[in-house]
Amino acid sequence: ETTVESSVPARIPVGLDPPLVVTFGSNEALSTFQCTLNGLDLGQCAGPPDNSWTANLDAGAYTLEVAAVDASENLNVDPTPQVVTFTVVGAPLTTIDSGTAPTDPTTDVTATFSFDADQANVTYVCSLDGVGFTACESPISYTEAQLSAAAIANGDPATAIGDHSFRVIATNDFGLMEASPALYEWTIELPPD
């Protein structure tokens, strides 16, 4: 009979250091263990004295099946393998909703952005026109004065008219930050005469 003796969390951060270790047991001494990961046969994945499987996996959902193999000549395999399911979580990916963002170009001197990450439990930081990132939530709105202040911070004239950019970065509950910010660029033009 196969047992899983270590506790495996349902969610694990990618790049876990030390890597994931799953320890097995059997009611028969000197058993070895056969494993499959997401249906892929890993063959003999563990045996005495450690009886453990170690992995550093990419982000994704995983199902590990483990079956004890006794040490007798006939190599009986446990017909009821133990199943361990877990998810390796990578950095989040944020999407800016283009339906709420300003049209490009526009004459509107305000801007509102809605955004969402592909994971729950994330925090965001936002930047307008390359000015430092600050904590933010979705949706976020900018007034004409804020757009003008961002222009001044970049050494441009004190006006909302011109090119603008909005960036947002998500960080998940494991502290993993997305590699590149989500970006939206647009131009505010003078209204027609």
Image (cartoon, grey):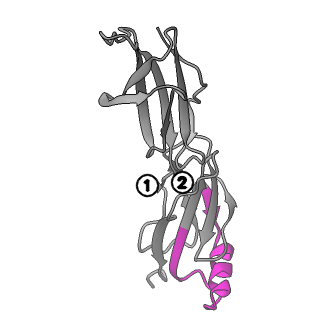
173 relative to 86 in the view: left or right: right
Residue identified by numbered label 2: 114
Q: Which residues are magenta?
A: 140-166
Residue 145 is at least partly visible in this image = yes
- Picture coordinates of residue 168, whole percent (x, y): 56, 62
- Picture coordinates of residue 156, whole percent (x, y): 60, 90
Check disc 1 and give the amino acid type.
Gly
For this rendering, which residue is in front, 19 or 160?
A: 19
- Picture coordinates of residue 99, whole percent (x, y): 43, 55
Tag 2 secondary structure: loop
For this rendering, which residue is in front, 98 or 83?
A: 83
Q: CA separation, marks 2 and 1?
A: 9 Å
Instruction: Place residue 151 in its image quadrant.
Output: bottom right
44 relative to 59 in the view: left or right: left
The residue lying at 49 percent from left, 40 percent from top is 88
Check disc 2 and give the amino acid type.
Ser
Camera-nearest label, 2 or 1: 2
Q: Are marks 2 and 1 in contact (CB under 8 Å)?
A: yes
Give the farthest residue toward the front. Answer: 73
Residue identified by numbered label 1: 99
